[in-house]
Amino acid sequence: MKRILVTGATGQIGSELVPALRNKYGNQNVIAAIHSRKGDPEIFDSGPSVTLDVCDAGLLERYVQEYEVDTIFHLAALLSSVAEEKPNTAWEVNMSGLLNTLEVARKNNCAVFFPSSIGAFGPTTPRENTPQDTLQRPNTIYGVTKVSGELLCDYYFSRFGVDTRGVRYPGIISHETAPSGGTTDYAVDIFYAALKQNRYTSFLKADTRLDMMFMPDAIRAALELMEADLNHLKHRNAFNITSFNITPQELAEEIQKHRPDFSIDYDVDPVRQAIADSWPKNMNDLAARKEWGWNARYNLETMVKTMLEKLSKKLSVKAGRTS
Ligand code: NAD
């Protein structure tokens, strides 16, 4: 990777991936492609940035050629609950955006990173220890675009030799940029609520178990996979990766160790609950471990401690005990 373009650069993942890539490959070599100018000004100030709607293939190709890009991290997408509200737009952005990226990559000899999701699985997938290769019949438009995206990336490699690679991320927890419209957003919202109001109302049931990951591990996974030795990759795309799996109640209990007065109650959103109930509780990530040495570094305890420390600084509140 010498010259990299990141789509969806101001989103939850992009806003941390762009600085990590700039740190590793040089500020001028990482182009942040943004859709709206909302977001951390650091992204615009610390290196090149361009405005891009991923549905505009011509403009994407112009930037790739102008900046002599050799690798695209394609993050632009509508996430699960927003996608359910706007299925047509979700199809357009998630599928046309990916097809445009793959076509531009084919014509300009670029590698592509595409993040899939636990959302690529469905209610008939085994929910415990979900295998790498298994039944995928998602019943959300987000899941339909993700499983189609996984297949399209495989196709572009086998048919045209495009160096496509990707992971299936679980829900991602982070403190830099708030998530926007995913089913696992509760696991970030809860920290803001704990520090601001000392209480949180969860839109998922207390015992809804889902796979999660802390952002530093998610960023490292993308970088390590894109640097991995090609000869060792059998799957290339859609590697299951995981760190820890939790329920809202378990997360609340871990937060209570630091903030004993914190309380949680539940007002379940049936749409997001149904989505969560169709997703794996924990994925089996043996293939990623074997093929490119994947290994998560954060667990529930270290993630909660770090989240509270970082967010309390950001919000200027005490992270520690409240009673
Ligand atoms: P996000 O919603 O925070 O960011 C997505 C970005 O895409 C936003 O900056 C938005 O402005 C941009 N975008 C939307 N429509 C666009 C368009 N037409 N053209 C260009 N940009 C457009 O999402 P995220 O959490 O950063 O997710 C990035 C990728 O990772 C997505 O593909 C998502 O499906 C995947 N993923 C995320 C998670 C998670 O928990 N965050 C989990 C699994 C997979």
Image: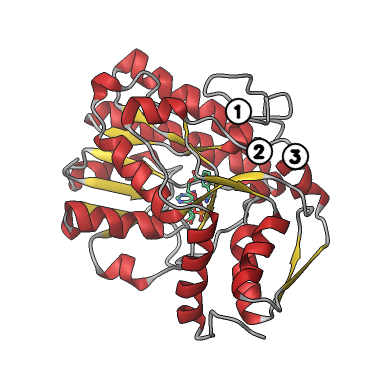
Residue, disc 3:
277
Toward the top, the furthest residue is 159
Between the residue at mark 3 and the residue at mark 1, the CA separation in whole angstroms equals 14 Å
Give the quadrant of residue 64. Answer: top left
N-terminal-most mark, 3 or 1: 1
Residue 317 against residue 275 in the figure, above or below: below
Amino acid type of the residue that numbered disc 3 sits on in the rendered structure: Asp
Residue at 55% across, 46% down: 244
Residue at 55% across, 80% down: 320
Amino acid type of the residue that numbered disc 2 sits on in the rendered structure: Lys
Give the image location of residue 211, x and y in percent. Answer: 59, 43
Amino acid type of the residue that numbered disc 1 sits on in the rendered structure: Thr
Q: Is mark 2 within 8 Å of ligand 1?
A: no
223 with respect to 249 (left or right)? left
Pointer 2 with pointer 1, Cβ within 8 A: yes
Residue 167 against residue 259 in the figure, above or below: above
Pointer 3 with pointer 1, Cβ within 8 A: no
Between the residue at mark 2 and the residue at mark 1, the CA separation in whole angstroms equals 8 Å
Mark 3 or 1: in front is 1
Residue at 37% across, 42% down: 221
Residue at 56% across, 24% down: 131
Residue, disc 2:
281
Q: Nearer the viewer, residue 272 or 320?
A: 320
Q: Is mark 1 within 8 Å of ligand 1?
A: no
Residue, disc 1:
130
Q: What SS does tag 2 mark?
A: loop
Q: What SS does tag 3 mark?
A: helix
